[in-house]
Amino acid sequence: MSPLGKRMEVELFTTMSRVIGEITTHHIHVRDELNDTRVSILVFQKIEVAALNDLQSPRISSRDAWLEKDEILLAVPYHIKGTTSMLTQRAIQSRLGKGEHRILLDLPPFRVGGNFYFAGKLRVEDALRRDRVPFGALTNAKVTFLPDPAVSFFVDEVAFNCDRVKMLCADYKVR
């Protein structure tokens, strides 16, 4: 591994754009990189940007670019390599059926439904406040683009910007 770290492919969404690229990091998960508060930007090598509001507009590509972390709404990891204590804890809790809550988030222009894990007997809202990290994560998630609900996709895991959540529904049911 280089002294700068290893390259990681990521797919990010802002309010206006879909960003696909590579970052160099010492972390094993994009969420860990986003939660590293020592740096406020992500630096990309190889990037492609597409507008969300105009699918006919040309894509932009570049060898080098940066993006402010607080502008990121969602981040989808392409590969999760290795393991962390958090991932191990989630796997154990999932097998035991503990700490799993189905939540729905509004992060305009997206709506995201998925599983949120935390330990303890807290309400989901209190667990998000307790952990107080910039980005949380949902597993087995469905992401819907609200301006065109026909545009939706499923992901194994998605990181979300906690400060940009406009609505949270815990343990919801679709009727």
Image (cartoon, rainbow, N blue to C red):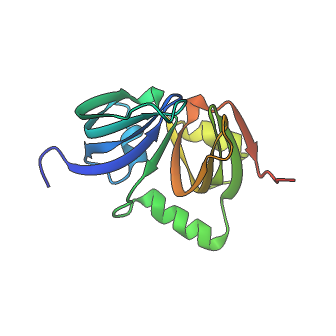
Of 124 and 49, the residue lying toward us: 49
Above or below, 11 against 98 in this view is above
Residue 37 in picture, x, y percent from top left = 38, 31
Residue farthest to the front, as pictured:
56
Query: Does 24 sit left or right of 99 as displayed?
Result: left
Tally the numbered discs.
0
Is residue 20 among the parts visible in the rendering?
A: yes
Question: In the image, residue 105 lies at what x, y percent?
Answer: 67, 41
Residue projecting furthest to the left:
3
Residue found at x 55% / y 41%: 131
Q: Quadrant of residue 60?
A: top left
Q: Residue at x 12, y 50 (%)?
A: 2
The x, y position of residue 61, in whole percent, is: 29, 35
Depth check: give the residue in front, 138 or 118. Answer: 138
Q: Quadrant of the N terminus?
A: bottom left
Q: Residue at x 75, y 43 (%)?
A: 169
Find the residue positioned furthest to the right.
175
> Looking at the picture, does residue 12 appear above or below residue 66?
below
- Left or right: residue 84 compared with residue 171: left
